[in-house]
Image (cartoon, coloured by chain):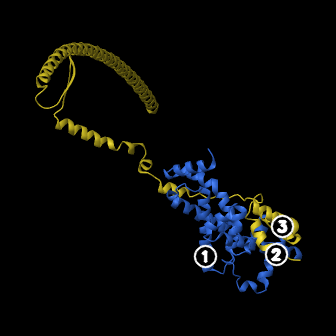
């Protein structure tokens, strides 16, 4: 039985009330969703919140899953939407720690000061996952999502365009912009270090 | 020296399969243009940096199991085994009602078992079966009763004899004990009486001796007195 068939079997069993099937289904995807959350939010607590919201959404809508798409695509669509919702809620409550949603640059971000210099200094000391999270944290959410979907989830630009309801060219442009921005950051950090 | 094709070319680089025709054209340009090549190398290096992400394990959580179990709990699971048989009393009542409504008669006799519906059939068979059953039952009952009675009488007699023997033994034992006790009492009484008489006799002899001694003393004193008086008489 391949992964897709196994997903379908687990979904069917979970819909009939099998707690074991539900748990197995969650275990198959929780790692990928949690790591996605870490990269998008930059911290474990928000990543857990996002993961729980995603699986709650999956649970509530499992009966609507028709099986004409892959379950993995469906769950990442939910994760994408939940991440956007979560970012919106956070922006309403506090000054965004997730960066801007969109390609426009926040006016405050252009003002030099300690808040800008501090992350750069920290970036030099970071390694591995923390470095990646710190790099991604400085991108707007729309670019961060494209980087996530393209690099970490391996989606094509066509799939990303469909998921985000944008044109394929916009998706390509955003990805290229994001990568360039990250490249510039790394160059600056290398110069500073 | 910059290249005007760089942005578009690199955007397409990440979108296209390099084995395709557009991909091959991109590759050809990259082989010729040092600026685009250098820019691409930096972007690939950045991508590699991101791809160095190590998968982190998920902290412990309940995986929505509590919610799942709460919402999928069926009444059968809640109430256990007996809940599965809730239909049985209703079905049994319904079956009984049907039997009554159709006046169903089930007869089991020496010829076998027969089931009949309605009042017309089976009454004679029932009467015959009941008669046979009552005859057999009365014969069996009287024989059994006779045997039981005899056994009861024999048991009663045996028990009565046993009781009588036990009673006689008890009476004899009681009387033997009483006689022995009485003899002991009489003996002790006589013994006591004898001792008392002996003491009284001793006391009597002692008293007699004492009085005799006193009499002798009195006589001696009288004799002395008499002899003293004789000396006082002038000769």
Tag nearer the camera, 2 or 3: 3
Q: Does the residue at mark 1 contact the one at mark 3 (Cβ under 8 Å)?
A: no
Residue B64's place in the image compared with B179, above or below, is: below
Q: Secondary structure at mark 1?
A: helix
Give the spatial CA distance, label 2 vs label 1. Answer: 27 Å
Residue A107's place in the image compared with A88, above or below, is: below
Tag nearer the camera, 2 or 1: 2
**Seen in the image, is B45 located left or right of residue A55?**
right
Q: Secondary structure at mark 3?
A: helix
Residue at numbered disc 2: A184
Q: Which quadrant of the rendered structure holds the N terminus of chain B?
A: bottom right
**Letter of the chain in blue:** A
| Residue B129 spot, x, y in % from top left | 15, 20
**Seen in the image, is A56 located left or right of residue B173?**
right
Tag nearer the camera, 1 or 3: 3
Of A90 and A70, nearer the camera is A70
Q: Can the viewer see residue A122 in this picture?
A: no
| Residue B183 spot, x, y in % from top left | 34, 17
| Residue A90 spot, x, y in % from top left | 62, 76
Mark 1 — on which chain does it sit?
A
Q: Residue at x 82, y 63 (%)?
A: B27
Q: Do the residues at discs 1 and 3 belong to one chain? A: no
Residue at numbered disc 3: B29
**Letter of the chain in yellow:** B
Circle count: 3
Residue B94's place in the image compared with A154, above or below, is: above
**Seen in the image, is B210 located left or right of residue B121?**
right
Residue at numbered disc 1: A88
Mark 2 — on which chain does it sit?
A
| Residue B9 spot, x, y in % from top left | 78, 70
């Amino acid at each position: 039985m391949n992964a897709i068939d196994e997903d379908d079997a687990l979904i069917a069993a979970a819909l009939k009330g099998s707690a074991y099937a539900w748990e197995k289904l969650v275990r198959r995807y929780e790692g990928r969703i949690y790591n996605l959350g870490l990269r998008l939010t930059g911290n474990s607590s928000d990543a857990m919140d996002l993961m729980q919201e995603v699986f709650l959404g999956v649970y509530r809508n499992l009966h609507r899953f028709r099986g004409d798409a892959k379950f993995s695509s469906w769950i990442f669509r939910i994760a994408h939407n939940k991440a956007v919702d979560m970012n919106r809620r956070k922006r309403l409550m506090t000054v965004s720690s997730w960066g801007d949603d969109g390609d426009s640059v926040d006016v405050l971000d252009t003002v030099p000061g300690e808040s800008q210099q501090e992350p750069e200094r920290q970036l030099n000391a970071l390694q591995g996952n923390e470095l990646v999270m710190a790099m991604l944290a400085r991108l707007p959410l729309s670019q961060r999502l494209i980087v996530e979907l393209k690099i970490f989830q391996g989606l094509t630009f066509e799939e990303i365009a469909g998921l985000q309801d944008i044109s394929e060219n916009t998706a390509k442009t955003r990805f290229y912009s994001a990568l360039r921005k990250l490249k510039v950051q790394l160059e600056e950090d290398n110069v500073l270090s | 020296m910059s290249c005007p094709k760089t942005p578009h070319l690199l955007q397409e680089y990440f979108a296209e399969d390099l084995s395709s025709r557009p991909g091959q054209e991109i590759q050809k340009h990259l082989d010729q243009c040092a600026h685009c090549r250098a820019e691409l190398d930096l972007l690939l290096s950045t991508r590699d940096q991101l791809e160095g992400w190590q998968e982190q394990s998920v902290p412990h959580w309940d995986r929505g199991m509590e919610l799942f179990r709460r919402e999928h709990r069926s009444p059968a699971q809640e109430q256990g085994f007996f809940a599965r048989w809730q239909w049985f009393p209703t079905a049994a009542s319904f079956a009984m009602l049907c039997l009554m409504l159709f006046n169903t008669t089930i007869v089991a006799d020496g010829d076998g078992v027969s089931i009949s519906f309605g009042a017309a059939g089976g009454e004679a068979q029932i009467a015959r079966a009941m008669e046979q059953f009552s005859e057999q039952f009365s014969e069996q009952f009287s024989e059994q009763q006779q045997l039981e009675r005899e056994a009861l009488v024999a048991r009663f007699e045996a028990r009565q004899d046993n009781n009588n023997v036990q009673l006689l033994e008890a009476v004899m034992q009681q009387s033997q004990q009483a006689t022995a006790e009485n003899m002991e009492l009489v003996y002790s009484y006589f013994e006591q009486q004898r001792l008392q008489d002996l003491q009284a006799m001793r006391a009597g002899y002692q008293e007699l001796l004492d009085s005799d001694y006193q009499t002798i003393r009195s006589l001696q004193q009288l004799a002395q007195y008499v002899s003293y008086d004789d000396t006082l008489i002038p000769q």
